[in-house]
Amino acid sequence: MQAARSDAHDTQVLIVGAGPTGLVLALWLTRLGIAVRIIDKTTEAGSTSRALAVQSRTLEFYRQVGVADAVVSRGVQIAGVNLWVRSSKAARVPFGQIGNGLSPFPFGLVFPQDAHERLLIKRLEALGVTVERQTELLAFDQSRDGVRAKLRQSDGAEAICHATYLAGCDGARSAVRNGLGFTFPGGTYTQRFYVADIQAHGPTTDHELHIDLDDADFLAVFPLKEQGCVRLVGTVREPTDENGELTFDDISPRAIAHLGLDVVKVNWFSTYRVHHRVAPSFRQGRVFLLGDAAHIHSPAGGQGMNTGIGDAVNLAWKLAAVSNQHATESLLDTYEVERIRFARRLVATTDRGFTLATSEGRLARLVRTQLIPVIAPLLFRWSPMRRLLFRTMSQIGIEYRHSRLSAGKAGAVHGGDRLPWVRVPTAWDNMQPDNFGPLESLAWQVHVYGALHADLSATCAEHELSIHVFAWNADMKRAGFKRDGFYLIRPDGYVALAAPDQDPRRLHDYMHAHGMQKQ
């Protein structure tokens, strides 16, 4: 790497890419006391977007840093999903409050990525962190002590940034991934996708989600906050010249004919290709890949942006723990172990789902147009299936039982599980707080559901762990907790250690085995 002038803004973590993944990583790290620098080569934040769904697990993470209420208030909660066949509504699946009893956010939420990014940027700015625009990563190298990155700044000058760690959140064409020399195996869907933000009238502008199942070209209508505004996401058959420019006129007859849309105005329209790929590794030394830089897949299920945000939260607390000397460097090995397995499974699952949704085969068409409209409402009436679907779509079912950080079992809760959510009624003020409130500290903590024993309390004090005791109730049993057991909770709300009794040696041995220092 050729010499460039030294830059005074050295930092602990250099984040490349200011999409939702990079912004959430910066937000969590800043809240945890870690100095960050976040750069993006674009001139300004995006004014159009593809990602729309904000899943419940993401909102739970956002609650920990005080963002959830703002996102929910600006988004649209999906009360129902409507399936259309032959220009008629074939079925409606009730979706509002589908996750009652499973999450403080038991609904599906639509909040467009462009507005989402603007909100996160403002929250970061309130914490003193500004996205450095028109700043591009040119090259980097790393040593045992840190990363040396060459940047081209907004004035065209080159500068060197020294960072302890480098996080690549820079999308499918990641300069960080390319700099590591990683391949990006997978494939590209033959269909071209489009997204359009429109103002319209018609039965599909009712603040619910509408999906056309009739033809092989996938089409969905998502509600936006503004009355009469919707976002179309779909695929379109290629023109004779597959590289030719498409306009809204190429797809609008489908939208009007099949979903009854009377288009008043097209605010913007764009097309893009979608890939399904996973990098072979998410880490090399002090350099990490997150979000689309690490894995990309079809938009089926609204999982992509949320998965990148999950990457960011998982990595953030680990970088902070190591940087603050609360854990050994080996803790960072668990980032890839925990996240790459889910990414691979997600890519395979969404690929199968999207293939079914867009296949032109006779059997696939039969399944879409006749079987799904009948089966889907029936499945949602069956409580176990409804809960399973919510856990899967909302990402609250993601678990890390295979991780070396996960140990023990108490009741139905294993080490590596997301902490089950339960209400905790209090008699004195008729409020209904829950067991997620303490997670807002972003710190390791111990939960006891039942009665606390003095020996465990003393061991928590020795390790400077806060302990939260919740009076036992029937909801806790239904959630899978073991009465009078204890649960060591990670900063990201996952159970690290589940113990059926309060033997303090279990806690002491866990902290020692994993090199966890006093908080």
Image: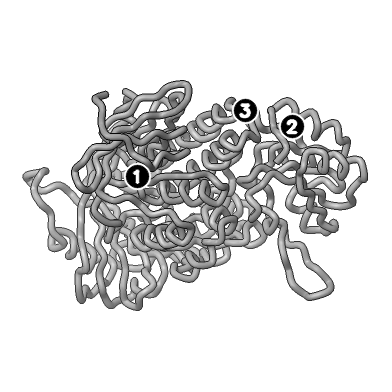
Q: Determine the image quadrant of residue 16.
A: top left
Number of residues whose C-alpha sits closer than 10 Å to that of mark 1, classed few (under 14), some (14–19) or many (20 or more): many
Q: Determine the image quadrant of residue 88.
A: bottom left
Give how far apart the Cα atoms at labels 2 and 3 are. Answer: 12 Å
412, 164: nearer the viewer = 164
Quarter of the C terminus within the rendering: top right
Residue corresponding to mark 1: 17
Rendering colour mode: one colour
Q: Is residue 244 above or below residue 505?
A: below
Q: Secondary structure at mark 1?
A: loop
Give how far apart the Cα atoms at labels 2 and 1 are. Answer: 35 Å
Of marks 1 and 3, the one in the foreground: 3
Quarter of the N terminus within the rendering: top left
Q: Secondary structure at mark 3?
A: loop
- At a point 49% along the width and 67% down the height, the residue shown is 70
Label 3 is placed on what type of residue? Thr
240, 435: nearer the viewer = 435
Number of residues whose C-alpha sits closer than 10 Å to that of mark 2, classed few (under 14), some (14–19) or many (20 or more): some
Give how far apart the Cα atoms at labels 1 and 3 are. Answer: 27 Å
Earlier in the chain: of badge 2 and badge 1, it is: 1
Label 2 is placed on what type of residue? Met
Residue 83 shows in the view: no
Q: Secondary structure at mark 2?
A: helix
Q: With 156 as the anchor, is 159 left or right in this view?
A: right
Earlier in the chain: of badge 1 and badge 3, it is: 1
81, 426: nearer the viewer = 426
Give the percent coordinates (x, y) of residue 393. Answer: 51, 50
Residue corresponding to mark 2: 511
Residue 328: which numbered mark, if any?
3
Q: Is residue 114 above or below residue 33?
A: below
